[in-house]
């Protein structure tokens, strides 16, 4: 899960782009009223996973949704930020995807009256059995001790 693509059926004007602020990077979508933007990646989860990430959305009517899709194309979206205006702060989010998930999607939708924005950063996957939530680099370090 090292790359994401923009789905062909979503207008390209509404895509997520990488932004740099100082030494940091994150991705952001600007979405017009009534529009949406989708960021997705293919995956091959043979067991259930939790998707962790940092989310930013603060405009009224805009929300960020996290979804899992299976091989049949059926999509479940167990995560969504509230569509009410929030504070301009990064918030941690997570959702669980079942075994045999083939796509993970993040959707920024805007039902508000003005242009909306969603930000996304630090996306990570962990098996549900990984109770310590160790990142891969941490596992390598710990196993060498």
Image (cartoon, rainbow, N blue to C red):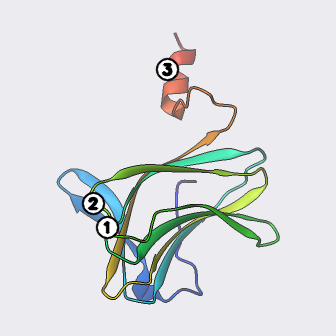
Q: Which mark is residue 141?
A: 3
Residue 125 image offset from top left, x and y in percent = 58, 45
Identify which residue, 128 or 58, lies in the foreground. 58
Query: Which residue sits furthest left?
Result: 22
Q: Which mark is residue 14?
A: none
Q: Quadrant of the N terminus?
A: bottom right
Label 2 with label 3: CB-CB less than 8 Å: no
Q: CA distance from mark 2 to mark 3?
A: 37 Å
Residue at the spot of label 2: 87
User: Dividing the picture into quarters, in which one does residue 67 lie?
Assistant: bottom right
Q: CA distance from mark 1 to mark 2?
A: 6 Å
Characterize the local packing of mark 2: few (<14), some (14-19) or many (20 or more) Cα atoms within 10 angstroms: few
Residue 15 image offset from top left, x and y in percent = 43, 79
Label 1 with label 2: CB-CB less than 8 Å: yes
Residue 50 image offset from top left, x and y in percent = 62, 45
Left or right position of 53 against 51: left
Of pointers 1 and 2, the one earlier in the residue sequence: 1
Circle 2: element type: loop
Q: CA distance from mark 3 to mark 1?
A: 38 Å
Circle 1: element type: loop
Mark 3 or mark 1, whichever is nearer to me: 1
Residue at the spot of label 1: 58
Circle 3: element type: helix
Left or right position of 51 against 113: right
Residue 30 image offset from top left, x and y in percent = 34, 78
Identify which residue is drawn at 67% across, 57% down. Answer: 43
Of pointers 2 and 3, the one earlier in the residue sequence: 2
């Amino acid at each position: 899960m090292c790359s994401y693509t923009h789905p062909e059926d979503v207008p390209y004007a509404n895509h997520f782009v990488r932004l740099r602020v100082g030494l940091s990077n994150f991705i952001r979508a600007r979405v017009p009223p009534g529009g949406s933007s989708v960021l997705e990646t293919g995956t091959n989860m043979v067991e259930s996973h939790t998707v962790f990430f940092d989310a930013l959305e603060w405009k009224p009517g805009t929300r960020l949704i996290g979804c899992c899709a299976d091989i049949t194309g059926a999509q479940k979206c167990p995560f969504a930020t509230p569509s009410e205006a929030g504070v301009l702060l990064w918030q941690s989010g997570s959702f669980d995807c079942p075994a045999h998930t083939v796509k993970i999607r993040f959707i920024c939708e805007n039902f508000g009256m003005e242009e909306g924005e969603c930000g996304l950063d630090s996306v990570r996957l962990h098996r549900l059995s990984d109770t310590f939530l160790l990142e891969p680099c941490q596992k390598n370090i710990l196993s060498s001790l």
